[in-house]
Amino acid sequence: MATTTPADHAAVAYDLTAPFYDALTRHDDYEVFASVLEDLIKRADPPGRRLLDAGCGTGRSSVLFADRGYRVTGFDISSAMIDIARTRHADTGVDFHVHDIRHPAPGDGPYDVVLCMSDIVNYLVDADHLAEAFAALSAVMAPGGVLVFDANTAHGYDLMTEPHVMEDDGLLALLRGRHLDAHGRYRLTMDVFRERSGEPGRWTRDTVEHHQAHHGQDRLAELLDAAGLRLAARHGLHISGTLADTVDETVHTKGLYAAVKPRAV
């Protein structure tokens, strides 16, 4: 029997995750990773500094690139995440939108740089939907523009079948992953326990399901090509955070990719 995924799964998952998303990712070094991404961007030599942060979440990466001199527009499918981004970063000049990545991008394009990070391509579980997303992003990219994105590897998904525990002040999260079928579909169940404000020792529990799919390197290259983009670089990301010159699906947890839109002749 074919595995079905709710059409609005990503919006539902991140609307539920939004209240504690920043706590869960508090120890991620956004500044260091922004430098890694900017190095990839500079190597591609885009024509300008208009940047689209596709799947911007609560806006932390958007603001980092605005601070680095980019003119940033951010969007996310989760209205709850965008509410936080707009409130927290109201004075930064970043324009935030609630938007589905498969549709023509909002804001003042064309864009010289597009970021699409944090497994977004994996949340597009159907290859047809990923094709639509690449085509929509390509349509708003300037000639010579660069798309930088990440994607989980087969090894990364295998690692997450073992339970993982994340802790922060007043928060405990248990993550459990499961392969759903032979086509790479995957479900990550996250149980989050939060201590009630003003009630020490009393906790609430939220259960969130994240649906993803593994997209191999050949599929990614084919879909990028169909969208008029050329895969220019691919790097494997080790669990330690270091980059390799190639992506090994059996060793690395993620692949980090850069695709360029050919310049007009």
Image (cartoon, rainbow, N blue to C red):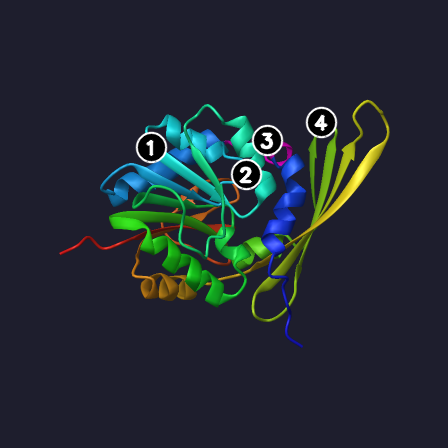
Region rendered in magenta:
22-29
Q: Nearer the viewer, mark 2 or mark 3?
A: 2
Q: Amino acid at mark 1?
A: Tyr
Disc 4 marks which residue? 169
**Taking the image as drawn, is residue 28 in sight?**
no
The residue nearer to you, when weighing 194 against 8, is: 8
Q: Is residue 25 magenta?
A: yes
Element at label 4? loop
Q: Amino acid at mark 4?
A: Asp
Q: Quadrant of the C terminus?
A: bottom left
Q: Nearer the viewer, mark 4 or mark 1?
A: 1
| Nearest to N terminus: mark 4 or mark 1 | 1
Element at label 2? helix
Disc 1 marks which residue? 70
Q: Are marks 2 and 4 in contact (CB under 8 Å)?
A: no
Q: Are marks 4 and 1 in contact (CB under 8 Å)?
A: no
Q: Distance from label 1 to label 3 (Cα)?
A: 24 Å
Q: Amino acid at mark 3?
A: Arg
Q: How would you rate the neighbour count of disc 4 (Cα within 10 Å): few for under 14, some for 14-19, many for 20 or more?
A: few
Disc 2 marks which residue? 82
Up the image or down, 197 lies above or below 20; here it is above
Element at label 1? loop
Q: Nearer the viewer, mark 1 or mark 3?
A: 1
Number of the label disc, if any, that sits on residue 26: 3
**Location of residue 250 in the rendering, given as x and y in whole percent from the top left corner:** 51, 58
Which quarter of the picture shows residue 194? top right
**Location of residue 12 in the rendering, given as x and y in whole percent from the top left corner:** 64, 50
**Location of residue 97 in the rendering, given as x and y in whole percent from the top left corner:** 48, 41
The residue nearer to you, when weighing 141 against 122, is: 141
| Nearest to N terminus: mark 2 or mark 3 | 3
Q: Is residue 8 magenta?
A: no
**Location of residue 220 in the rendering, given as x and y in whole percent from the top left corner:** 41, 61
